[in-house]
Image: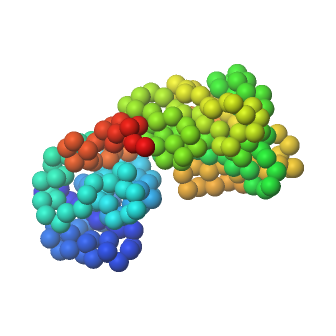
Amino acid sequence: MSKICVVTSETAAAEVAAKRLRQRYGEVAMEDADIVVALGGDGLMLQTLHRVMGTDRPVYGMNFGSVGFMMNTFSEDGLIERLQASQRTCIYPLSMTVLDISGQTRSALALNEVSLFRSTYQAAKLQILVDDEVRLDELICDGALLATPAGSTAYNLSAHGPILPIEAPLLALTPISPFRPRRWRGAILSNRAVVKFVTREANKRPVSAVADNVEFQNVLEVTVREDRTHGVTLLFDPGTSLEERVLSEQFRF
């Protein structure tokens, strides 16, 4: 039988369910587990995936959140059988490297998206380069983001970006409330592309950069590329794969 680690969002309902699962199926520490079972919502799933990143431990989520796009339905019964029958989906993060106004360079990984946001009432001014070629000399906006296929149904979709098939070798580049050029709605890029955002008038128009839940402020340049060395694996019940969920999301209204 697989060794299981159960993690929760620490809500009362999730904690009660986790206690029952641990009593029934046992539990080991995460570093000793074959599979991590996450009880919560998509936020917990994202945190858990970051924790297992770089290991071979897959994550099977059960929904105790408000959305649960990346989660399976909860049931206390038949967990081992569900894990054995589950379908695997491997996703890869974006690597973000930031140069800030102090000259410091920092980095972080994002499974959903890398986002840039204006930090004050002043609109951001961004230059966008793809593979060292200037594609948009100046975007005046509230911000911009680069999303993975897995992240294309999250903030990217709310910003009117495209939904990408989960297996597609693509990234979605999407502006957030563009002012100029007003009609630019973004671009679909190869996952091999290297995207650089350069802030204009950084002292007057400060910009922050966010990789999932890691934020850096007062950025000058942000370079983003896919990182194939840190894949993570999600487990889904048959017929409810992430690919199917992404496809179904395109027909919701």
How are the residues colored? rainbow
In the figure, residue 31 lies in which quadrant? bottom left
Residue 112 is left or right of residue 115, and the answer is left
Please state, as top left, top right, bottom left or bottom right, where the N terminus lies in the image.
bottom left
Q: Position of residue 169 (x, y in %)?
A: 44, 27
Q: How many numbered marks have been drawn onto this rendered protein structure? A: 0
Q: Residue at position x 62%, y 31% from top? A: 186
Q: Residue at position x 62%, y 46% from top? A: 115
In the figure, residue 224 lies in which quadrant? top right
Q: From the viewer's perspective, is residue 122 above or below residue 160?
A: below
> Would you say residue 217 is visible in this rendering?
yes
Residue 112 is left or right of residue 17, and the answer is right
Q: Position of residue 41 (x, y in %)?
A: 39, 60
Nearer to me, 181 or 71: 181
Q: Position of residue 132 (x, y in %)?
A: 69, 24
Residue 210 is left or right of residue 1, and the answer is right
Q: Residue at position x 40%, y 32% from top? A: 165
Q: Residue at position x 64%, y 24% from top? A: 131
Q: From the viewer's perspective, is residue 72 above or below residue 240?
A: below
In the figure, residue 29 lies in which quadrant? bottom left
Q: Position of residue 213 (x, y in %)?
A: 55, 56
Q: From the viewer's perspective, is residue 166 above or below residue 190?
A: below
Please state, as top left, top right, bottom left or bottom right, where the C terminus lies in the image.
top left
